[in-house]
Image: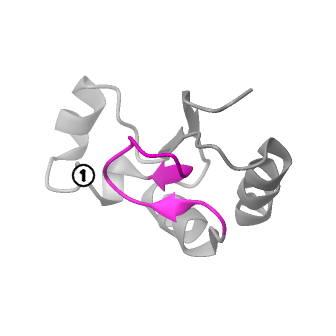
Amino acid sequence: KLGGNIVAFEIKGGIVAGRNFLDKIQLCSLSANLGDTRSIVTHPASTTHSKLSVEERLSVSISDGLVRVSVGLETVTDIIADLKQALE
C-alpha cells in the first residue's frame, strides 16, 4: 500500500527496447540506486551492468530486456500509468 517493493520484468526486444522504455518514462525517476521514496526504474543491461558481456550478464540472470522498478510512494495508479505509456 505504501510502496517499498522491487518488481522486475522482461521487455521483448532486448537492449534497444529497454533503452526506448527508459526514454519514455515520465513520472518514475531513472537511477542505478533503487532505494528512494520515489519510484525508480533501471535497465541493468544498458546501465549498471553494461560493461559485462551478454554471457556474464546472463550468468547472474540479467537479460537484455530486464527492467527493475523500485516502487516508491507515488499513487499506484500514476506509477502503473507511467509504466504502461512507456511500454506502448
Q: Is residue 37 magenta?
A: yes
Q: Residue at x 79, y 64 (%)?
A: 85
| Above/below status of 22 relative to 77 | below
- Viewer-side residue, 77 vs 67: 77
Instruction: Judge from the rendering whether residue 11 lies leftward or rightward of residue 54; answer left or right.
Output: right
Q: Residue at x 41, y 47 (%)?
A: 64
Instruction: Judge from the rendering whether residue 85 lies leftward or rightward of residue 73; answer left or right.
Output: right
| Above/below status of 5 relative to 84 | above
Q: Which residues are magenta?
A: 27-42
> Residue 27 in the image: x percent, y percent?
66, 66
Q: Residue beneath label 1, please?
A: 48
Q: Is residue 47 magenta?
A: no
- Rendered-image quadrant of the C terminus: bottom right
> Residue 52 in the image: x percent, y percent?
15, 47
Q: Amino acid at mark 1?
A: Thr
Instruction: Judge from the rendering whether residue 73 lies leftward or rightward of residue 55; answer left or right.
Output: right
> Which secondary structure type mostly characterizes the magenta part of the structure?
loop
Instruction: Judge from the rendering whether residue 63 lies leftward or rightward of residue 14; answer left or right.
Output: left
- Rendered-image quadrant of the N terminus: top right
Q: Residue at x 82, y 56 (%)?
A: 81
- Viewer-side residue, 60 vs 47: 47
Secondary element at tag 1: loop
Neighbours of disc 1 within 10 Å: few (<14), some (14-19), many (20+): few
> Residue 61 in the image: x percent, y percent?
34, 26
| Above/below status of 52 relative to 24 | above
| Above/below status of 77 relative to 27 | above
Q: Residue at x 57, y 39 (%)?
A: 10
